[in-house]
Amino acid sequence: MVGPETGGPETGGPETGGGLVVVHVDDALLVLDKPSGLHTVPAKPPGTQDCLEARAKAAFPGARLVHRLDRDTSGIVVMARTALAQRHLGWQFERRQLEKTYVARVAGEVAAEAGRIELPLIADWPNRPRQMVCHLRGKPAVTEWRRLAREAGATRLELRPLTGRSHQLRVHLLAIGRPILGDPLYGDPASADRLQLHAACLRLRHPDGGAWIAFSAAVPF
């Protein structure tokens, strides 16, 4: 779903083509629904060079990367179609002037209705690409969460990262004893058929005119 909130560009439903699920496209923006298992950018050689960025540039020449999702995370990725739009969107990400919402399924039945995790994070250098909590040298990281539903042995959560640290949601949930199901780095990969983490919604200001606009992609698990 996508909807202009104050006069932003209209769009139709998702389209599939060229290995892409296109949520929205206009002269400034390209919004995609990335599948789990696909890199956002090429893997380091000799890894696969197939990625969301390469597919987007093949279908929409000149598409420019603005942000990334982990390979195993699915959901909304926005790209710019002009240099001006790239700078505008990059500023919003850098200044945290946009709103990101994720949905995750985590291990165990969470009793509380909502909460906030404030734990500083740093790269776990001997075990890269893993990250870890470090109160001495870690960078501030904040995640708000809300319980959506409970099921046998698991809970569905809505997550709002207020900072953008690498693997933030995965490490924060592990730290409170609720690893995301299917996580190959921080949990039990056999607990689900994929990482149960999805970038469900992204709300930002359109680079052309500054109107608020929200993009969303249905949760596939």
Image (tube, helix red, strand yellow):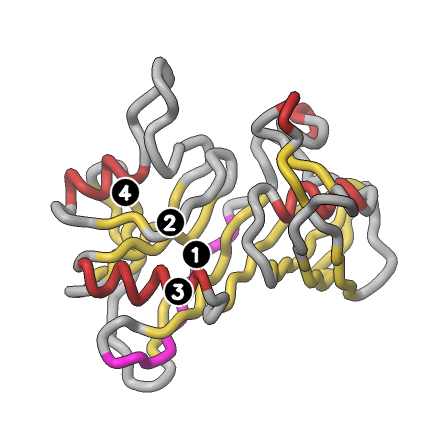
Marks 1/3: CA–CA distance: 7 Å
Q: Which residue is mark 1?
A: 217
Residue stretch rendered in magenta on the structure: 209-219
Q: Amino acid at mark 3?
A: Phe
Position of residue 205 relative to residue 188, above or below, is: below
Q: Residues within 10 Å of mark 2 (few under 14, many from 20)?
A: many
Query: Going from the N terminus, do you reach mark 4 or mark 2 first?
Result: 4
Q: Which residue is mark 2?
A: 33
The x and y percentages for residue 212 are 38, 78
Which quarter shows the N terminus? bottom left
Which quarter shows the C terminus? top right
The x and y percentages for residue 14 are 30, 56
Q: Residue furthest right?
A: 111
Task: Tell whether label 1 touches label 2 (CB within 8 Å).
Answer: yes
Q: Which residue is mark 3?
A: 215
Marks 3/2: CA–CA distance: 10 Å
Task: Tell whether label 3 touches label 1 (CB within 8 Å).
Answer: yes
Q: Amino acid at mark 1?
A: Ala
Q: Residues within 10 Å of mark 3 (few under 14, many from 20)?
A: many
Which of the 4 image quarters holds residue 189? Answer: top right
Q: Which residue is mark 4?
A: 20
